[in-house]
Amino acid sequence: EAQVTQNPRYLITVTGKKLTVTCSQNMNHEYMSWYRQDPGLGLRQIYYSMNVEVTDKGDVPEGYKVSRKEKRNFPLILESPSPNQTSLYFCASSLSVQGHQPQHFGDGTRLSIL
Amino acid sequence: AQKVTQAQTEISVVEKEDVTLDCVYETRDTTYYLFWYKQPPSGELVFLIRRNSFDEQNEISGRYSWNFQKSTSSFNFTITASQVVDSAVYFCALSEATGANNLFFGTGTRLTVIP
């Protein structure tokens, strides 16, 4: 089954404790992206990647890191989480940048930073 | 700069009523793409439609229809004969051809269909 898989789905942690949210897609997609969803703000892009070893900042990259060492994986790293990073996070992928194909989203990761 | 506005924060309708969700966008690109996504109470994001800026034909898919008007920079979504299963948050989004495949989302409209 074609899918984007995020782990964990839920996490409660404390300020300053490094965490990683994994994202994996099995569709051989070139493009991957991370968004965060906050009430009243919709979804905002954090980082994106157009291919292996190619990453770039989105609209709200502060406090986050990403890597794209393999085509299928695009982990989101919070080196020193803070309460303002409490949010619902979505990973997404699409076949390519060409033609702006629809993005397939994972089921989301709800992070609570205390 | 790009922007997507969904002015309706919440809408409630009674089952079988028709409902239109508004979306107004701003972009300087002449080539762009518009999307609608559905987020049901379970939380996942479901792709509904993609439309490019050169195709102003309206589209119908079952009870769903979309009205794209470049003259008013709008891409409205109508649900005919609404059902309880249509209850969800609906997001309109824009992607510009000059950028990567990055989506700019509106703030969403929460639709509640009352049985």
Image (cartoon, grey):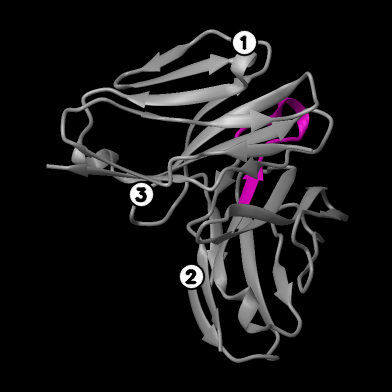
Q: Position of residue B79 (x, y in %)?
A: 32, 26
Kindly identify the amino acid type of the residue bearing the numbered disc 3.
Pro
Chain at numbered mark 3: B
Q: CA distance from mark 1 to mark 2?
A: 38 Å
Q: Position of residue B75 (x, y in %)?
A: 53, 24
Instruction: Please tell me which residue is depicted at 52% across the width and 49% down the height of the picture.
Output: A3
Picture disc at residue B40: 3
Question: Where, by quadrant of the figure, is residue A77 drawn?
Answer: bottom right
Q: Judging from the image, what secondary structure is the residue with disc 1 in?
A: loop
B4 is higher (above) or lower (below) than A41: above
Instruction: Provide the residue span drawn in magenta.
Output: A92-102
Q: Is residue A100 magenta?
A: yes
Instruction: Please tell me which residue is depicted at 46% across the width and 30% down the height of the picture.
Output: B22
A64 is higher (above) or lower (below) than B18: below
Q: CA distance from mark 3 to mark 2?
A: 17 Å
In the shown orientation, is residue B90 left or right of residue B107?
Answer: left
Q: Position of residue B97 (x, y in %)?
A: 78, 28
B60 is higher (above) or lower (below) than B9: above
In the shown orientation, is residue B38 left or right of residue A28?
Answer: left
Nearer the viewer's eye, disc 3 or disc 2? 3
Kindly identify the amino acid type of the residue bearing the numbered disc 2.
Arg
For the residues beneath circles 3 and 2, the answer to whether they share a chain is no
For the residues beneath circles 3 and 1, the answer to whether they share a chain is yes
- Residue indicated by mark 2: A9
Picture disc at residue B55: 1
